[in-house]
Image (tube, rainbow, N blue to C red):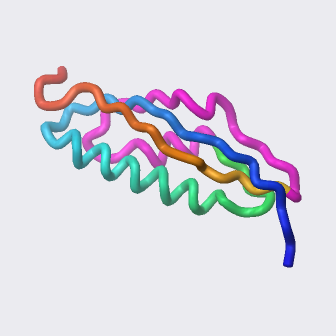
Amino acid sequence: MVSATVIPYAVAAELRVRSARSDLVCAEALAGASAYAADRHAIGAEVAVSGLLAALHQPGCRTVALLAPATDLIVAEDEAPYCTGIDLTVTGGADAR
């Protein structure tokens, strides 16, 4: 069995949506980010800002501002990134232009 040092990180993002179903857009973004984080929870894996942005940017989402992490999370070969939480704020909605 290989052991690794866990490197915790959290995700925080602001989603700007144009959809009247902002709750659905947020749920899909959360599911995407959760799946990406689970995939990256491996020894030596990197957490890329670009990967998080892609996972968060779901249909109905106009823009994503990633607040955390601010840069790619690069870990050593004996470390594993672990997402401790995902905090999403949604702006816009049916009246957004």
Residue furthest out toward the bottom: 1
The location of residue 40, given as percent across then percent down, is 64, 57
- Residue under the image location 67 percent in, 32 percent down: 71
The location of residue 75, given as percent across then percent down, is 81, 48
The location of residue 68, given as percent across then percent down, is 57, 32
The location of residue 5, given as percent across then percent down, is 82, 55
Look at the image and tell me in which quarter the N terminus lies: bottom right
Look at the image and tell me in which quarter the C terminus lies: top left
Residue 14: quadrant of the picture: top left
Residue 88: quadrant of the picture: top left
Magenta region includes residue 63 = yes
- Residue under the image location 72 percent in, 41 percent down: 73
- Residue under the image location 23 percent in, 48 percent down: 24
Q: Horizontal placement of 37 versus 23: left or right?
A: right
Q: Horizontal placement of 68 versus 24: left or right?
A: right
Magenta region includes residue 14 = no
Residue 64: quadrant of the picture: top left
- Residue under the image location 26 percent in, 32 percent down: 17
Nearer to me, 58 or 26: 26
Q: How many marks on residues?
A: 0
Q: Is residue 72 above or below residue 38?
A: above
The boundaries of the magenta stretch are 49-78
